[in-house]
Amino acid sequence: MTDPSARATWLRDEIARHNEAYFIRDAPLIPDADYDELVRELRHLEAEHPALATVDSPSASVGATPSDTFRPVQHAQAMLSLDNAFDESELRTWADRVVRALSKDPDRLSCSVEPKIDGLALSITYLDGVLSQAATRGDGTVGEDVTANVRTISSVPSRLGATLGRVDVRGEVYLAKSDFRDLNERQRLRGDREFANPRNAAAGSLRQKDPAVTATRPLSFLAYQVIDPQNRIGATTQSALFSRLRELGFLVAAEATTEVGVEAIVARSSWFETHRHDLDYDVDGVVVKLDGFGERSSLGSTSRAPRWAIARKFPPEERTTRLLAIEVSIGRTGRATPYAVLEPVNVAGSTVSMATLHNQDQVLAKDVRPGDLVIVRKAGDVIPEVVGAVPSERGERGERWIFPAECPECGGPLERVGDERDIYCVNPSCPARLLQQVVHFASRGALDIEGLGEQRAAQLIQAGLVRDVADLPTLRVEDLVGLEGLASVSAASLVAAIAGAKVQPLSRLLVALGIRHVGPVAARALAAWFLTYGDLAAAPLAELEAVDGVGPVIAASVHRFVRSPEGAERLHRLEEAGFTLFEPRATALDQTLAGRAVVVTGTLAGFSREQAESAIVARGGTAPATVSAKTYCVVVGQSPGMSKVTRARHLGVPVVGEAEFEGLLVTGAWHTTIADAGDAAL
Ligand code: IVH
């Protein structure tokens, strides 16, 4: 489709179709990033060919025509959209333009940097301090009257405790991630449809015909703007406005800050990008706004968006792409995991060409088939996954995918083991299984053998030098020299690195053995309890289950492994080779934290995360990942997870700074807590 006019018409229809799905039916058909791309392309076309622009083009308007379920409400002042910056350089371009327009020194540019909450914009009208009306954005000029529903939201005050004439308070309605999980759990238990994401759940909840239903949904509201022509609220900057809004009973984003200077503004917006997953609400970017209202007026707005603000969008975590094939990979336990081979697509800043499909049930439930257009998601450090097929694009479809009966690596049978839902290659000498076992044996959390990564391991297996991890200590320099990329020096270092692993304690060896379900936490618990491999192997199942931190599933798996002929043989050979089969007793430290749970969040000076946790454990405490009412205290380092801090505050759990950490270890107590972690910790 090269004809610009035909392309523009197609884009307009397509955008209108997606607007309707997103704004009216609360059921988007494609990820937001794909939608943004359509709008961007249309704007681009219209800019290049001004004759193509139409007055009613969706590129110039916001949202969609309101539905007729709710009474229409004319907004006192249009609810504008925001222009987007898709990367740091676009943010800098915006800042440059603002600095020039205001003739300002870039180091003195003062902006509010706020999370861009992925919810729904709402405008709430107060008359003489009393909530009188609440409306959705609609098309920006006319919204929908959702007053009765908004009255059920606990974070929306019904009275302001101040008589202010008419003010419209604007902000975002959203569902906190934790509330979203609870809501979906309830939906599931009741057999009701689960929501795709917190935004859809919030939209569906706000736009209920019956306010009693909305009342059962844990919606929240964060305020960020007021329409107050007489300036009765009396704020002249965004920071002052946030304080006033708080005084009036509204919630405002705790992470919003005022930054001075372009560099500080850019740095704070990157902070949000790094920490987006630590927040208890979904964000799709940051909003940067001029702090001073006077400066805002001198810049003004276009019909669509203010010039004084910009949304820096984060790299999208969901994209659509073509599913080329479904294949199966074999892990170290022999588990066969289906994965998608995709047409490469950029997701969350990196190119994705493969994504997990988890297991057979998931492939069936998602009903994805080779040839489909699918949605791929990559959030934070989580491995990319296929969310599902794009429903609107399902035309002629390929065959349903069937799990193969044979291992793609060794040709052995793939079988369900016991009543597990997973499927396994049961051939113990399957080369794919062996490769993953060797890689795991040498990995950092296990025996940490430098120079033994996936490529090297594959080479050793292919050369027939390694048939089991217990063959590794038998390797000699002369066996290795001559393999590609292995001269005598690197061969000698590899042999030395393997020999060096022999001194690692039993807890590390237990991880390295790759016993199903045994990670570092269980391995440490088992090693600390039994102290020697001999005692562990001789223990009856009931004693394994009695170990603190070892549940019945782990106990059964360990019991099975240590009593299996392969397990016994492998251990025997490792022992012969000189590996350490015992746990050195820690020198006794005062158990200042006995029975106490200390949560660490953020980076502590002088301690890696692992070191901080083991220091707590060495003092008799535990270091769980989440805050509960039983938590003894939360230690906050640099760049902490704010949801942990917020939760601690909510539960009344003491929050202490990193300066207190060493004292806490030695005495079990602290001198001062952080009065306002919102300021002190960030
Ligand atoms: S200010 C005229 N601030 O993003 C300025 N908007 O893409 C109006 N949003 O319609 C918006 N967080 O629904 C602003 N801290 C924030 C926001 C925010 C989320 C939403 C809002 C707006 C949309 C624009």
Image: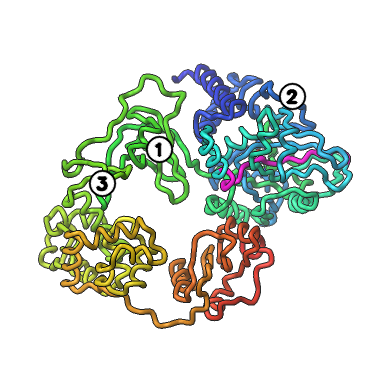
Q: Which residue is mark 3?
A: 330
Q: Give the quarter of the figure containing the N terminus.
A: top left
Q: Which of the 4 quarters of the picture holds residue 560?
A: bottom left
Q: Which residue is mark 1?
A: 386
Q: Is residue 172 magenta?
A: yes
Residue 185 drawn at (x, y percent): 53, 42
Q: Which residue is mark 2?
A: 71
| Separation of residues labelled 1 and 3 (CA atoms) | 19 Å
Residue nearest the observer in this picture, 661 or 235: 661
Residue 107 drawn at (x, y percent): 66, 57
Residue nearest the observer in this picture, 69 or 453: 69
Residue 310 drawn at (x, y percent): 64, 42
Q: Which residues are magenta?
A: 165-180
Horizontal side of 176 relative to 399 (left or right) equals right
Is 212 placed above or below 678 here? Answer: above
| Separation of residues labelled 1 and 2 (CA atoms) | 39 Å
For disc 2, the neighbor class at 10 Å (few under 14, some 14 to 19, many from 20) is few
Q: Give the secondary structure at mark 2.
A: loop
Q: Earlier in the sequence, mark 1 or mark 3?
A: 3
Q: Earlier in the sequence, mark 1 or mark 2?
A: 2
- Residues at discs 1 and 3 in contact (Cβ within 8 Å): no
